[in-house]
Image (tube, helix red, strand yellow):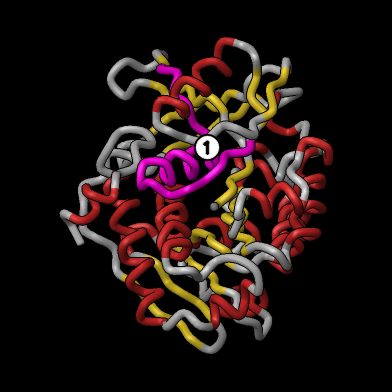
Amino acid sequence: MIVVIGEALIDLIESRENKGQFQAVVGGANANVALALARRGTNHQFLARISSDRFGGLIKERLSSNNVSLDHIINTDEPTTLAVISVNAQGSPTYNFYTNGTADWGWTKEELPSKETLKALNTTAIEFGCLTMAMEPGNKVIEAWAKEIKDDVTISHDINIRSALGFDRAVEKERVERVNSFSHIIKASDEDIEWLYNLEPDSDLTEIINSWINNTNKIVLLTRGSQGTRIYRNNEVVDVPARKITVVDTVGAGDTFIAHLLGQLEENNYLGTNALEKLASLPTEQLAQYVKTAGIAASITCERAGCEPPTLEEIACLS
């Protein structure tokens, strides 16, 4: 069982043809991960705080109709978070967020599952990241909870920086490094790291990533768009090329990637207690194959408008 915790919000996506017209689409990085897990048939639970407003109703309808497991969501009267998205000619989205007092960030310790509950669910991994680990006050509650359970499950952290919200770079860098310190799998884009460390594009990121790994068996996945994914593990660096496609947009691509990677790790018993030992037993060639498959899944999402992750059958046709 993979437990995904985090934001489920509404993306207001501007029409490319009719500027100023917007379509309301269910989004949020962690909701997208849960959706991708459901589409591939992976056993999961999505932990989210979802509003009782109309947008919250749309979120529940979208996720439940795609078989996302919502048994442990928190229902709240706080409003739904909104993200306004414009997509450029290359398919890359620009985000503006409306987050003050919204449902996603109000986590309390009592709303999070105990160790006993996680064990009863046969939880092997916790997946989180993006705004959920950046927005106060809930991020600190989730961080403390994750540190308490890190010896019992695999912690997967998808950094997924949203710089449009005006975060302080130094504060974000400290936060990311702190969460990385107890995470076992870390995913970041080259743009994430370049922003965090105030680097020029195409900088050498090896020293930074090695500091995250810190001579352990952690795995870091650096996604580089059309250049594919670079795998870092202790004393190893492996490049996995990307599939050549025509991009419609990249919304949800990284979320689809991490879902399909975790799904494969789950199916082959590489998640759970003693996380670093399990990851150390994973042959690099096999990990590279998992990353290749996850990349194919992400590329299919890029060929579609919005976050529409593929099924395993759709991936098999291209593998």
Q: Is residue 208 visible?
A: no
Q: Residue furthest bottom?
A: 235
Total marks in image? 1
Asked whether 43 falls inside the magenta stretch, the response is yes
Q: Residue at 63% across / 40% down in the picture?
A: 6
Image quadrant containing the C terminus: bottom left
Q: Is residue 228 above or below residue 213?
A: above
Q: Is residue 130 visible?
A: yes
Residue bearing the label numbered 1: 31
Q: Is residue 74 above or below residue 288?
A: above
Q: Tell me where residue 260 appears, x and y as whole percent.
A: 40, 55
Give the magenta range: 23-47
- The quarter of the picture where residue 136 lies is top right
Q: Tell me where residue 241 appears, x and y as whole percent.
A: 29, 69
Asked whether 249 falls inside the magenta stretch, the response is no
* Of residues 7 and 223, the one drawn nearer to the viewer in this rendering: 7
Q: Residue at 82% across / 53% down in the picture?
A: 144
Q: Residue furthest top?
A: 54
- The quarter of the picture where residue 173 lies is bottom right
Q: Residue at 32% across / 72% down in the picture?
A: 289
**Relative side of 214 to 40, left or right:** right
* Of residues 269 and 235, the one drawn nearer to the viewer in this rendering: 269
Dot 1 falls on a residue whose secondary structure is helix
* Label 1 Cα crowd, 10 Å radius (few <14 / some 14-19 / many 20+): many
Q: Residue at 58% across / 62% down in the picture?
A: 193
Q: Tell me where residue 92 appears, x and y as whole percent.
A: 39, 42
The amino acid pointed to by label 1 is Ala
Q: Is residue 239 above or below residue 62?
A: below
Q: Tell me where residue 39 appears, x and y as whole percent.
A: 36, 41
Q: Residue furthest left?
A: 317
Q: Is residue 188 above or below residue 24?
A: below
* Of residues 282 and 9, the one drawn nearer to the viewer in this rendering: 282
